[in-house]
Image: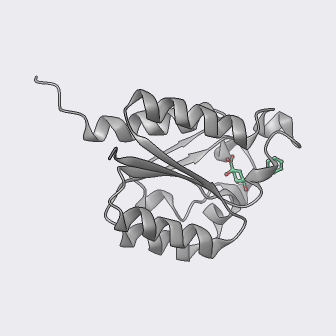
Amino acid sequence: MAKSVYVLNGPNLNLLGTREPETYGRATLKDVERLCRDRATHHKLGLEFRQSNHEGDLIDWIHEAGAKKAVGIVLNAGGYTHTSVSIRDAIAAVNIPVVEVHISNIFARDCFRHHSHIAPVARASLCGFGIEGYGLAIDGLAALIAPKHKA
Ligand code: CA2
């Protein structure tokens, strides 16, 4: 069976494409899922794509991805990025790489968005590329398991 990437989306991301297009663009979460599926298929990886408005669901899915030894997790934790010590603890507890993704450039926005509890325990963080950031994160995870180039 193909190894899988988990793409986890936090609160309010189900509303993508319906409001605040100047910040988040016009693509819907279904469009994000399609983009992720294309990238994962390109790398011959399976995809688990999920969204929840509940912190505990995100934590359970991080544990699940760890237990199933997924290739990694692409995580847009939404507002929990800036508040959740528990999501940070879940990431630190699993032994797989997590790439933090934000559609917007969180550092060009409100001060309270400048701090991420997730960044210090993430393998990498991407923000400001719009929904393309999800595809770039999957490319990055695929590169981690690809055979290394010889010098
Ligand atoms: O830029 C991102 O991807 C964020 O993670 C999005 C979160 C925000 O709290 C973070 O600071 C940055 C908010 C997600 C809300 O998504 C909506 C999308 C469309 C309409 C309303 C909300």
Residue 95 falls left or right of residue 131: left
- Where residue 121 sits in the image (x, y, percent)? 41, 62
Which sits in the foreground, 98 or 142? 142
In the picture as drawn, the residue positioned furthest to the right comes out as: 19
Which sits in the foreground, 131 or 127? 131
Quarter containing the C terminus: top left
Q: Residue at x 31, y 35 (%)?
A: 143
Q: Residue at x 55, y 37 (%)?
A: 36
- Where residue 60 sits in the image (x, y, percent)? 52, 72
Q: Is residue 65 above or below residue 125?
A: below
Q: Looking at the image, what colour scheme do you see?
A: one colour
Residue 13 falls left or right of residue 85: right
Which sits in the foreground, 24 or 2? 2
Residue 98 falls left or right of residue 112: left
Q: Residue at x 61, y 71 (%)?
A: 57
Q: Is residue 47 above or below residue 136?
A: below
